Amino acid sequence: MTNEIYMENIMDHYKNPRNFGSLESPTVKHIEYNPLCGDKIEMSLLIENGKIKDIKFKGNGCSISQASTSMLLEMSNGKSIDEIKNLTKEDVFEMLSINLSPVRMKCALLGLDTLKNAILIHEKYGEKNE
Amino acid sequence: MKLLSMNEIREDFPILNRKINGKRMVYLDSAATSQKPVQVIKAIEDYYRNYNANVHRGIYQLSVEATEAYESAHDEVASLINANPEEIIFTKGTTESLNLVAYSLGNRIRDGEILLSKMEHHSNLVPWQQLAKRNNLKLKFFDLTDDGELDLSNIDELINKNTKIVSLTHVSNVLGTINPVKEIAKIAHENNALFIADSAQGVPHIEVNVKNLDVDFLAFSGHKMLGPTGIGALYGKKEILEEMDPFMFGGDMIREVKLNESTWNTLPWKFEAGTPNISGGIGFGVAAKYIKRIGIDNIENHEKNIVKYAYDKLNEMDNVEIYGPEKRSGLISFNLKGIHAHDVSSILDESGIAIRGGHHCCMPLMEHLGIAGNARASFYIYNNEEDVDTLVKGLEEVKRIFK
Ligand SMILES: Cc1ncc(COP(=O)(O)O)c(C=O)c1O
């Protein structure tokens, strides 16, 4: 289908990203890049009692990387760390519900990579780490 | 074009008949890699079908034929840039060519300065940057003017008695800027520095005469000039190459080996260790011959016309930002305001249009321009005005979707 990836909800999240910005005093903060296109996502998380209490992201990149991150954060807020760790690529693709070429899949997964690596860093280095 | 008409040229490129998403394919990414004419494809097939053998090793018929074809490919490439065949080393491409110089020649440099520019492709930046780290050398950079040309205002300070190497892109793969390498090489030489040109975007598109430019080294890739991937060349002045240590050691590059010492083969073989990319080399030679047959001045003219046509059309559109100087080689980098280059190329792909979006391996240049990336349409001998018209229509569609 012609340009089906530019569906309304994706364009909506791209133009009006939810949870955009950064937290004042996050438990953990992490940046990931997509070296192919230079896209960048920075996430800050507030974690309390094994749960995500608040989460925000900043970044620049294509509509797919930004919109999928926005949608992902909307879905992750309030979830437990274990629930986040169990999120898969397929969950992201399902959330987007569009057909992506292998190159664009990388764009779509940048947010999930950032989120999961932030959690890993948090688990490895504990509360205070950025 | 004088000798061959556009249609005749397009017929040599079977891939141009492909349909993408049911549409006529418009290939506008020749700066990344060019398409290949049937002559090149057939030459590679012919080698594998009819005289596949290693080179420089057998005295039997097949090996003699393969050796002759591989060596005469050096002649074809050499004559395209007015070099002597022994000054043409086949490498796997521009990247390897530049690394070869940075290692073999660079490793000997123990102090001093290396001068580059802010518009370099990573392959003419990182090898020098890492050499500077290894050997404690100082890195310096030409700044750029607002037009995207080298800022030469402080050249007397940038090139001085401490300068050992000046390495610059001949033609920018993002801005299309054609740098005055001849003039800068002259100043480098007055200061006893060596001058290296990254001509990955030069040799395919404009006349390059190494004797006239008087550069010490010049690197380019076969795959950007109608040849196959995995093959390219390093031109080096004979007297410098003879002085230089080999880059890699092994078979083919030696004259005599004893258990504890070795001597090196003659040029260029001293720098071509191991079984080379024989089919690639043969294809590269045929590509060089094809370019000579069409005439580099005809290619240059054709690109000048098509890039002007495209520039005028893009310039007329709203919310298009174009990067680089007015006098440019055959490519245009641009952004549609507020739309990421990936989204632009993704939507264009639906219309069968192939353009590149991203940082084009020039992250410091992107930082200088203050952007994450841009879209680039690059042209070659087989592109026509219809391709540009399709691009413009496609861009209107992008703007409609992102309205
Ligand atoms: C200006 C410039 N330099 C160097 C390179 C590297 O060429 P290759 O990848 O063929 O080694 C390229 C191509 O991407 C280029 O455009």
Image (cartoon, rainbow, N blue to C red):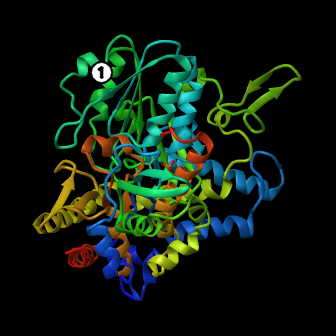
Q: Nearer the viewer, residue B264 or A54?
A: A54
Q: Nearer the viewer, residue B67 or B25?
A: B25
Amino acid type for the residue under numbered disc 1:
Ile
Q: Is residue B2 visible?
A: no
Density class for disc 1 (Cα within 10 Å; few <14, some 14-19, many ≥20) is some
- Image position of B83 (left or right of A12): right
Residue that mark 1 sits on? B187
Furthest-right residue in this view = B259
* Up-down relation of residue B143 to residue B225 (above or below): above
Give percent across and percent down for residue B62: 78, 59
Give percent across and percent down for residue B323: 22, 52
| Residue B212, quarter of the rendered image | top left
Question: Of helix, strand and loop, which one carries label 1?
Answer: helix
| Residue B10, quarter of the rendered image | bottom left
Residue at point 35%, 10% (across, down): B161
Residue at point 44%, 37% (across, down): B124
- Image position of A59 (left or right of B146): right
* Up-down relation of residue A74 to residue B61 (above or below): below
Q: Nearer the viewer, residue A90 or B325?
A: A90
Give percent across and percent down for residue B165: 42, 23
Residue at point 43%, 78% (across, down): B16
